[in-house]
Amino acid sequence: MCVELENITATDRSIVIKELKRKRSDVLHQMQLYGVDTSNWSIVDKFCLNVRIAGKRFRELDCIELEALYKKLRVMRKKQENK
C-alpha cells in the first residue's frame, strides 16, 4: 500500500514539475523578447526582484506567480511595441 501511494505521489509530482518547467520557459522567453539577458541568472533575478515585476527571485516563483508574470510581460511588451 505504501509503494502504491509513493507511485501516485511521484506521478503527481512529475506532472507539477513538468508544468513548472513549461511556465518558467514561457516566462524566460517573454523576458528575452522584452530585452532581458536571460543567459545571466543574476540579471534575471534582479529583474524579478523589482516589486513591480514579481518581488521574488525567479527560482522562488510558483506556477501561479509565473502565470501572472507571463501575462504582465506580454502587456509590457505590447506597450513597448506601441511606442
Image (tube, helix red, strand yellow):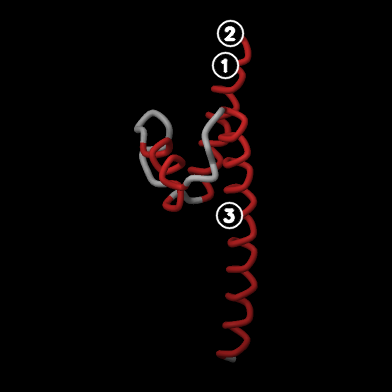
Q: Is mark 3 on a helix, strand or loop?
A: helix
Residue designated by label 1:
80
Give the residue displayed 35% in from the left and 32% down from the top: 51
Give the residue displayed 53% in from the left and 49% down from the top: 63
Q: Which of disc 2 and disc 3 is earlier in sequence?
A: 3
Q: Closer to the camera: disc 1 or disc 3?
A: 1
The answer to whether the residue labelled 3 contacts the one labelled 2, judged by CB atoms less than 8 Å apart, is: no
Residue 34 spot, x, y in % from top left? 57, 28
Disc 3 versus disc 2: distance between alpha carbons? 33 Å
Neighbor class of circle 3 (other Cα within 10 Å; few <14, some 14-19, many 20+) is some
Q: Is mark 2 on a helix, strand or loop?
A: loop
Residue designated by label 2:
83
Q: Closer to the camera: disc 3 or disc 2?
A: 2
Q: Which of disc 3 and disc 1 is earlier in sequence?
A: 3
Give the residue displayed 60% in from the left and 75% down from the top: 10
Residue 17 spot, x, y in % from top left? 59, 62
**Residue farthest to the top, as pictured:** 83
Indicate the amino acid at tag 1: Gln
- 52 relative to 9 in the view: left or right: left
Disc 1 versus disc 3: distance between alpha carbons? 27 Å
Q: Along the line of sight, which residue is nearer the eye, 43 or 16?
A: 43
